Image (spheres, rainbow, N blue to C red):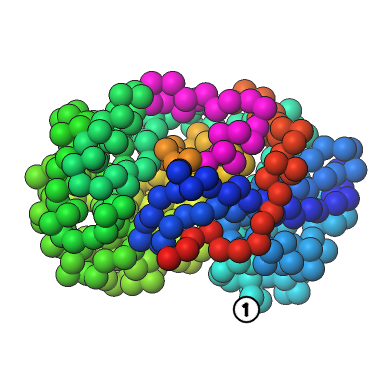
């Protein structure tokens, strides 16, 4: 096969006013997504998803990364990852066995674009082989436990919201430390206590601070809620503060999870060196796609660290996360968003197979899903921010 076309397609989905919710990021008014397509000379097309500002990702793909892929054989995913990562220095990098990334490709939006293209390449390769991506990667399982991810309800309303997730059959749920009614330590304690009442003693409860607390405040919150049997405390402080994460981990009686905003194995190496996490949460559309997260997962496994992929975004991102979970031996659970997200639930012709809190892998080749015919018309890109304060 030879790659004949690479396309970057930005998409948006406005959120109706009655379904909008405020988080620590602001009022969410729309959802953006980035779809990547890689087409081969045999007519097969692989699809991928990238995080990052869509117009910027599109420009990077069109002008920087697409020329690196055109004419290449998509079977060579390791070679193509290194070529996109090292840019003009890919030839000596591959010859010497030493990665030599150019400055703009080490982190940020370019790495997000590389991640999306890597997903598309694996989809294309697995379609050509006639097997699902997780089998092409090396299957560890064909189903995995899921957790319902949401939890913004204010005050005592958290009891009904999280209880509703448990009623759907999920044996694990996650809520935000900052609800729609803002943050205080007492408010967090009250909402988390209400959530535990709603789900009962047998459902796992995770809490997520989105990296917005100070080290001291995170430690205090953990002390206030540890009696509610917290399965993990996610991003308690800024993801840039690996030393601070380690201080939190050393001073709380619950596992610490982080990694959704990290790039490549090098960021995760820092987290491991700082002993800053118990659960690694790479995002396949940011940390480097299938190719790089296989390395991240192996590094984590060597330290006894489990993987729980961050899986918040479009249907393409979630589909890729399913295959990642199925092919990662030290992955134990997968995130399932409970937000209003039509681009997650109404993008594909096929439904995701989630039953009684278990996600089942598709048995069709590649990612295993087909875009609806009206996808690009329905989700036409709308410039502007996703959040308003």
| Residue 352: percent from left, percent from top | 55, 27
| Residue 216: percent from left, percent from top | 17, 70
| Image quarter of the N terminus | top right
Magenta residues?
341-361
Dot 1 lies on which element?
helix
Between residue 295 and residue 65, name the one nearer to us: 65
| Image quarter of the C terminus | bottom left
| Picture residue at 60% right of the left edge, 47% below the top | 13
Between residue 220 and residue 100, name the one nearer to us: 220
Q: Is residue 353 magenta?
A: yes
Which residue carries the number 1 mark? 103
- Badge 1 crowding class, 10 Å Cα cut-off, few under 14, some 14 to 19, many 20 or more, is few
| Picture residue at 29% right of the left edge, 72% below the top | 243
| Residue 237: percent from left, percent from top | 29, 65
Where, by quadrant of the figure, is residue 86 drawn? bottom right
Using residue 209 as the reference point, say whether residue 82 is left or right of it: right
| Picture residue at 79% right of the left edge, 40% below the top | 45
Where, by quadrant of the figure, is residue 240 drawn? bottom left
């Amino acid at each position: 096969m030879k790659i004949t076309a690479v396309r970057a397609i930005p998409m948006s989905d406005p959120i109706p006013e009655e379904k909008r919710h405020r988080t620590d990021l602001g009022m969410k008014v729309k959802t953006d997504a980035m779809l990547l397509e890689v087409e081969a000379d045999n007519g097969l097309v692989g699809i991928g998803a990238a995080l990052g500002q869509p117009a910027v990702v599109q420009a990077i793909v069109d002008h920087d990364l697409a020329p690196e892929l055109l004419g290449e054989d998509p079977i060579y995913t390791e070679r193509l990852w290194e070529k996109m990562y090292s840019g003009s220095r890919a030839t000596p990098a591959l010859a010497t066995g030493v990665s030599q990334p150019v400055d703009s490709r080490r982190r940020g939006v370019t790495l997000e674009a590389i991640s999306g293209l890597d997903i598309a390449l694996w989809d294309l390769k697995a379609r050509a082989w006639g097997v699902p991506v997780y089998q092409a990667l090396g299957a560890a399982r064909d189903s995995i436990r899921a957790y319902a991810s949401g939890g913004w309800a204010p005050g005592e309303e958290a009891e009904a919201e999280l209880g509703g997730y448990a009623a759907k059959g999920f044996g694990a749920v996650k809520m935000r430390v900052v609800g729609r009614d803002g943050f205080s330590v007492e408010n967090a304690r009250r909402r988390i206590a209400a959530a535990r009442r709603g789900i009962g003693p047998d459902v796992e409860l995770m809490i997520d601070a989105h990296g917005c607390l100070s080290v001291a405040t995170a430690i205090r919150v953990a002390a206030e809620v540890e009696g509610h049997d917290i399965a993990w405390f996610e991003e308690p402080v800024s993801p840039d503060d690996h030393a601070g994460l380690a201080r939190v981990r050393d001073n709380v009686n619950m596992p610490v999870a982080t990694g959704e905003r990290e790039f490549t194995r090098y960021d995760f190496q820092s987290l491991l060196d700082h002993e800053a996490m118990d659960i690694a949460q790479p995002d396949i559309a940011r940390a480097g796609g299938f190719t790089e997260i296989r390395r991240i997962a192996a590094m984590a496994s060597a330290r006894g660290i489990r993987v729980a992929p961050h899986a918040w975004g479009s249907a393409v991102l979630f589909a890729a996360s399913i295959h990642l979970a199925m092919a990662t031996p030290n992955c134990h659970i997968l995130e399932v968003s409970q937000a209003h997200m039509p681009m997650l639930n109404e993008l594909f012709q096929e439904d995701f197979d989630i039953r009684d809190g278990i996600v089942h892998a598709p048995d069709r080749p590649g990612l295993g899903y087909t875009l609806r015919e009206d996808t690009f018309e329905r989700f036409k890109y709308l410039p502007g921010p996703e959040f308003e304060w």
